[in-house]
Amino acid sequence: MSTLDFIYRRRSVRKFKADPVPEDDIRELLKAATWAPSGKNLQNWHFVVITDARKIAEIARLVEDKNAKLAEYLTDEAKIKTFRGSVPYHTVFKGAPALILIYASPYETIADLLTEAGILPQAEALRYGRPNPGIQNIAAATENFLLAAASLGYGTCWMTGPTYAAEEISACIGFAKPGFHLAAMTPLGIPAESAGANPPRKPLDEVVTFIR
Ligand SMILES: Cc1cc2nc3c(=O)[nH]c(=O)nc-3n(C[C@H](O)[C@H](O)[C@H](O)COP(=O)(O)O)c2cc1C
């Protein structure tokens, strides 16, 4: 038992029991999400909680339809097959008792200001925007949510795959907040699968450099 077990307990869960998640638990997890750090303490996130099983199923259908539509634009047969084959990974929330949509609003950086002012060539200004602190804020909140959920025994799966149907999803649930777009989502529920292992990680030495 290590104090870091709350990290190692989390894994992506893609099948869930139907048991509903008590709203108090969802609120606790969302509070943990908002405890994440954010650049300028902007807290540029908004969470939409869906527990209506029909809506969750409808969202999965919208993703399936949009995937089929987008596949028509591809010309390479192998890429079409891969993209179409990703549908099950874009709809893993199908049978979950809750789906959390994570919306993001922009975070203005020097890259935006320079691009706007036209002072630097756009390519150079865009380079300064690569760290994208706005999305880092969202990622921090999402990871907090996932770790907190695992600590309470819930399964989650960070998902960006289905965001190509963002507009259709937002229209389906009737949610709109000016300046916000759908950045990620996660199902939430009790895992149905027997606890498997996380996929392997790259060796630490491959992804770490010490400058001593
Ligand atoms: C930004 C991001 C997007 C992801 N999108 C999806 C997704 O759309 N569908 C999915 O099944 N898993 C998705 N995942 C989960 C990854 O596949 C998973 O985290 C990775 O394989 C490592 O497995 P683990 O989470 O069990 O440790 C996503 C993860 C991240 C961080």
Image (cartoon, rainbow, N blue to C red):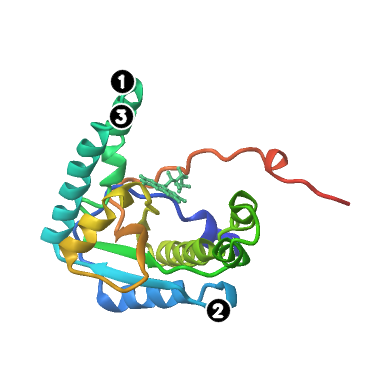
What residue would you read off at disc 3? 74
The answer for how far apart the CA atoms under marks 1 and 2 are is 46 Å
The answer for how far apart the CA atoms under marks 1 and 3 are is 8 Å
What residue would you read off at disc 2? 41
Q: Residue at x 26, y 71 (%)?
A: 176
Q: Is residue 110 left or right of residue 62?
A: right
- Which of the 4 quarters of the picture holds residue 37? bottom right
**68 up-or-down from 10: above or below:** above
Nearer the viewer's eye, disc 1 or disc 2?
Answer: 1
**84 up-or-down from 161: above or below:** above
Residue type at mark 3 is Leu
Q: Is residue 212 left or right of residue 182?
A: right
Badge 1 element: helix
What residue would you read off at disc 1? 77
Image coordinates for residue 40, horizontal then vertical, percent = 58, 77
Q: Are marks 1 and 2 in contact (CB under 8 Å)?
A: no
Q: Residue at x 18, y 65 (%)?
A: 173
Q: Is residue 204 left or right of residue 116?
A: right
Q: Is residue 62 left or right of residue 190?
A: left
Image coordinates for residue 212, horizontal then vertical, percent = 88, 52
Label 2 crowd (10 A; few <14 / some 14-19 / many >=20): few
Total labels: the figure holds 3
Badge 3 element: loop
Image coordinates for residue 41, horizontal then vertical, percent = 55, 79
Residue type at mark 1 is Glu
The answer for how far apart the CA atoms under marks 2 and 3 are is 41 Å
Residue type at mark 2 is Asn
Image coordinates for residue 145, horizontal then vertical, percent = 43, 66
Nearer the viewer's eye, disc 1 or disc 3?
Answer: 3
144 and 13: which is toward the camera = 144
